[in-house]
Image (cartoon, rainbow, N blue to C red):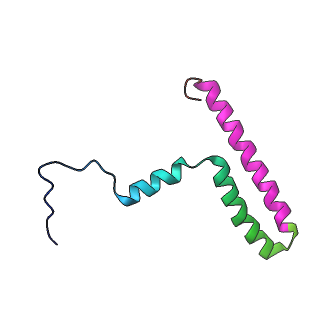
Amino acid sequence: MAHQYSGGRTSTRPTYPTVQTHRFRERPAVIGAMTGFVVIATVLYLFLGPIGILYALGFEVLYLLIYLATIAFAALLDPDVY
């Protein structure tokens, strides 16, 4: 493997996996909830039929309520951040 000379300076540019991980963490909670809903709804639909979609909706509502409660609690602890 050849050594690449960078002119004596180290690169501050993040590597590709680091960028991907950072983008994954930055996405809004609603996008994550929608992605989770599609995955859960698909699996539950395959196992339970059409009623599985209703179960998936229930899980999504529960997830969003827990997320909102967590954000509200964090805002109470540190109002400068939220």
Taking the spot 77% from the left edge, 55% from the top edge, the residue there is: 59
- Residue 31 at what x, y percent from top left? 65, 53
Name the residue at 37% across, 60% down: 16
* Quadrant of the image containing the C terminus: top right
Rendering quarter of residue 42: bottom right
The image quadrant of residue 40 is: bottom right
- Image coordinates of residue 3 in percent, x first then y, are 14, 65
| Residue 42 falls within the magenta-colored stretch | no
Would residue 65 appear left or right of 4 to someone viewing this image?
A: right
- Residue at coordinates 68% horizontally, 43% vertically from top-left? 67
Give the main secondary structure of the magenta stretch. Answer: helix
Q: Residue furthest right?
A: 51
**Which residue lies at the image location 27% right of the left edge and 47% below the top edge?**
12
Q: Is residue 79 above or below residue 8?
A: above
Image-based side of 52 in relation to 71, left or right: right
Nearer to us in this view, 38 or 9: 9
Residue 7 left/right relative to 77: left
Residue 62 in the image: state x and y as whole percent. 77, 49
- Please state the total of marks drawn on the protein image: 0
- Closest to the observer, 61 or 24: 24
Question: Quadrant location of the N terminus?
Answer: bottom left
- Find out whether residue 76 is within the magenta segment: yes
In magenta, the rendered stretch is 52-78
